[in-house]
Image (spheres, rainbow, N blue to C red):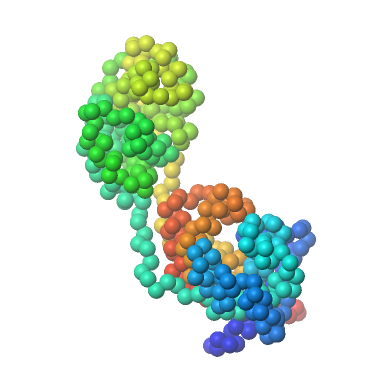
């Protein structure tokens, strides 16, 4: 049955609570911190309540959110058609100090519960914002982007990052949290390059910060081609193993690091390992941990240690292939509704929301600036690419109003 706009608006605002909930579901609430035993109760909003809510909105909210609830201010969310219970809870959270925003706290701190309910009902009754008229940002697959950006690296570091040149390191089998900062260190010259490495200096100078992250991710995911460097080694590997007792703490058993910021050494090029140890020993590489260790090693021991690690087989890096925005949305939609159109009274709709606002919110959950166990878990694994992709996905979805209907008990 088709519902005209006027009727739909009235029904959408009919019930603030939407449905009676026996108890709070803490994991479904994005921000508020209700007291134990609190519950959502149906609150019927009549036409006069909507009118009162509009008056309050004009006086307190319209400067940032506009009277129609479609914001034109950077960083300020659209709230037209937003789920009323969610808005009520968020306004109460600002009022109680559970959410920190000086402007919002100032606006709501003297409002009664009745006034907050009416404002929430008013904005919920409005037609949601439309998606942007522009073309959505094109999704860039970070792995494919890394493969493309790494093309100049193959000349020296080998196809898929497996070195075939003595003295040139393997790039495969390294965690992104190690490899990306290392590449950046060469780029900023915190790590110095020899004159013979001018080609590398030129190559990395052309990489953006995003390129560096993508390259590191690409090499970390080359598990099918994971093998030791195809270069010769010279030394006593057995004797080298005996000398590595102190190395396992940082570089792991068998040279496979379990600390993402520390490099794995298994299967690394012998010449590169030996040169690195000499650099730490003479101070040309400055490191508070490696310097003291290397200074205790003589030349023979360093050769043996390098030979031991070069002869080991590398292991896959514990890093997952990134999901596309659509794949992330499949997970997010479980709470936020199909295409970001929430049908849960206390969970916000995301469709047609501003990109910059969605990005900022996800980062706030990552840093803990916004508190929510569920959202912290979801956002904690997101990369910068993921955040941008998810925000763009929802910003360009068609927003739809929702009607909450109370069913009489039998």
Report x, y in % for residue 146.
32, 47
- The x and y percentages for residue 191 are 35, 30
Relative to 75, say whether 265 is above or below: above
Residue 84: in sight, yes or no? Answer: no
Q: Residue at x 54, y 65 (%)?
A: 76
On-image quarter of the C terminus: bottom right
**Residue nearest the viewer, comparing 404 with 65:** 65
Q: Answer with left or right where residue 131 lies relative to residue 123.
A: left
Camera-nearest residue between 13 and 333: 13
Residue nearer the viewer, 49 or 173? 49
Q: Residue at x 28, y 17 (%)?
A: 234
Residue 373 percent location from the top left of the image: 62, 52
Which residue is at a point 65% across and 75% down the rendered structure image? 59
Report the residue at 46% width, 60% height from top.
Answer: 390
Would residue 38 be found to the left or right of residue 250 on screen? right
Does 360 sit left or right of 23 as displayed? left
Residue 105 seen anywhere in this rendered image of the structure = yes
Res 308 → quadrant: top left
Out of 296 and 25, give the one closest to the viewer: 296
Q: Please identify the quarter of the rendering in which residue 173 is found.
A: top left
How many badges with numbers are in the image?
0
Q: Quadrant of the N terminus?
A: bottom right
Image location (x, y in percent) of residue 67: 58, 77
């Amino acid at each position: 049955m088709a519902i005209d706009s006027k009727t739909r608006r009235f029904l959408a605002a009919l019930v603030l609570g939407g449905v009676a909930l026996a108890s709070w579901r803490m994991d479904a609430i994005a921000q508020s911190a209700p007291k134990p035993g609190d519950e959502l109760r149906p609150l019927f909003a009549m036409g006069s309540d909507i009118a009162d809510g509009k008056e309050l909105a004009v006086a307190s909210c319209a400067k940032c959110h506009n009277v129609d609830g479609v914001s034109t201010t950077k960083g300020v969310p659209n709230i037209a058609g937003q789920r009323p219970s969610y808005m009520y809870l968020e306004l109460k959270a600002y009022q109680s100090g559970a959410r920190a925003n000086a402007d919002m706290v100032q606006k709501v701190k003297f409002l009664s519960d009745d006034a907050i309910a009416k404002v929430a009902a008013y904005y919920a009754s409005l037609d949601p914002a439309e998606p942007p008229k522009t073309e959505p940002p094109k999704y860039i697959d970070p792995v494919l982007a890394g493969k493309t950006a790494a093309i100049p690296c193959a000349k020296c570091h080998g196809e898929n990052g497996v070195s075939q040149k003595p003295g040139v390191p393997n790039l495969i089998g390294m965690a992104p949290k190690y490899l990306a900062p290392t590449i950046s260190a060469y780029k900023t010259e915190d790590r110095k390059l020899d004159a013979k490495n001018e080609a590398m200096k030129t190559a990395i100078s052309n990489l953006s910060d995003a390129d560096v992250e993508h390259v590191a991710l690409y090499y970390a995911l080359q598990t099918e081609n994971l093998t030791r460097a195809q270069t010769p080694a010279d030394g006593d590997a057995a004797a080298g193993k005996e000398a590595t007792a102190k190395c396992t703490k940082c570089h792991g058993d068998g040279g496979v690091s379990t600390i993402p910021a520390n490099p794995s050494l298994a299967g690394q090029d012998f010449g590169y390992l030996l040169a690195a140890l000499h650099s730490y020993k003479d101070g040309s590489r400055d490191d508070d941990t490696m310097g003291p260790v290397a200074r205790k090693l003589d030349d023979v021991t360093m050769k043996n240690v390098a030979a031991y690690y070069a002869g080991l087989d590398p292991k896959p890096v514990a890093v997952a292939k990134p999901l596309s925005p659509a794949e992330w949305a499949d997970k997010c939609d479980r709470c936020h509704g199909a295409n970001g159109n929430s049908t849960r009274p206390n969970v916000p709709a995301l469709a047609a929301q501003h990109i910059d606002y969605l990005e900022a919110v996800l980062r706030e959950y990552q840093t803990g600036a916004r508190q929510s166990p569920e959202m912290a878990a979801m956002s904690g694994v997101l990369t910068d690419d993921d955040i941008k992709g998810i925000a763009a996905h929802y910003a360009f979805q068609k927003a739809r109003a929702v009607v909450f209907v109370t069913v009489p008990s039998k």
